[in-house]
Amino acid sequence: MRLYIIRHGETAWNRERRLQGQTDIPLNAFGEKLAEETGRGLSEVPFDLCIASPLTRTRQTALQVLRENRAFLNRKGRAELSDFCSAEDFRREAAEELAAGKDPWDLGFPLLTDKRIIEIDFGIWEGLGCGPKNMEIPEESFREFFQDPEKVQMPKGGETAAQVKKRTGAFLQELSQDPLLRDKTILIASHGFAVRAMLNPFYEHPEDFWQGHPPYNCAVNLLETDGQGRLRLTDRDRLYYDPSLAANFYGGTE
């Protein structure tokens, strides 16, 4: 099993330095360009299926990547956001196909959504400015969030880091134990905080939640199973576009 885990492309709220969390903000034109260039870099990866967060920006990112992908185009052609179905529906349909003695992969190239890899819920912080010119969050709390989010007091209605780690961890565990997916190559489109939470157990220093900074837009991480079927991180935060375009909106441009 190989899991290519990508953060979504840039959005207007990224550019404006606003916390978007689970607010459904689409990609801007630059975000679409980053996803397209990333897709070219991944064009020869033989993807078998795609799983995205339910939000528009992750589904857009996934489709931009896949439209440059040879394996996807050979099986599916052009797809739309409406072609995504829930992972639960796919598993039910696949089980029915197997029970009937059929190959579930004959259903086409699966485009799935899974709510467990949606971004952290910022509660009452959603939509608030977080840049030096539009800071609307208590600065001490904001600094703490980007120093050690596992200890910060989250705002009313928000999730904790532990909650996001639990749901993204359950998602990965289910994938790794699914015999239907054992030999598959999967594109997973998620979000900055959710990606760091998902990969936290695989980092050499998991106590550093952010690993220096949030993953840049369209950064790609790769998890692969070893000889014992255990997932391991073999590539991290790879960019398939000009690195000078990578903006860390929580700490300037690198």
Image (cartoon, helix red, strand yellow):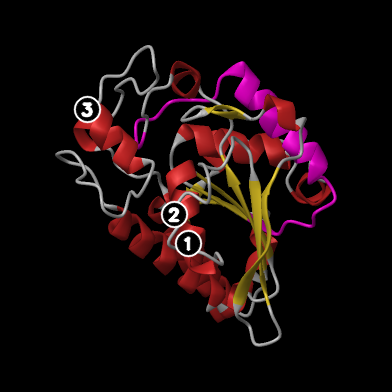
The amino acid marked with disc number 3 is Pro
The residue tagged 3 is 138
> Image point 56% across, 67% down: which residue?
204
- In the rendered image, residue 80, in percent from the top left (x then y), is placed at 60, 34
Q: Position of residue 235 (x, y in %)?
A: 70, 58
Q: Does the magenta-highlighted stretch encompass residue 37?
A: yes
Residue at point 32%, 42% (across, down): 145
Between disc 2 and disc 3, whose residue precedes? 3
Query: In whole angstroms, how far apart are the C-alphas of marks 3 and 1?
Result: 27 Å
Between disc 1 and disc 2, the foreground one is 2
Q: Position of residue 100 (x, y in %)?
A: 57, 78
Q: Residue furthest left?
A: 156
- What distance separates the C-alpha of mark 2 from that of mark 3? 21 Å
Residue named by callout 2: 209
Label 2 sits on a secondary structure element that is loop
- Which label number is shown at residue 200? 1
Point 39% across, 55% down: residue: 116
Residue type of the residue flagged with mark 1: Asn
| Secondary structure at numbered mark 3 | loop
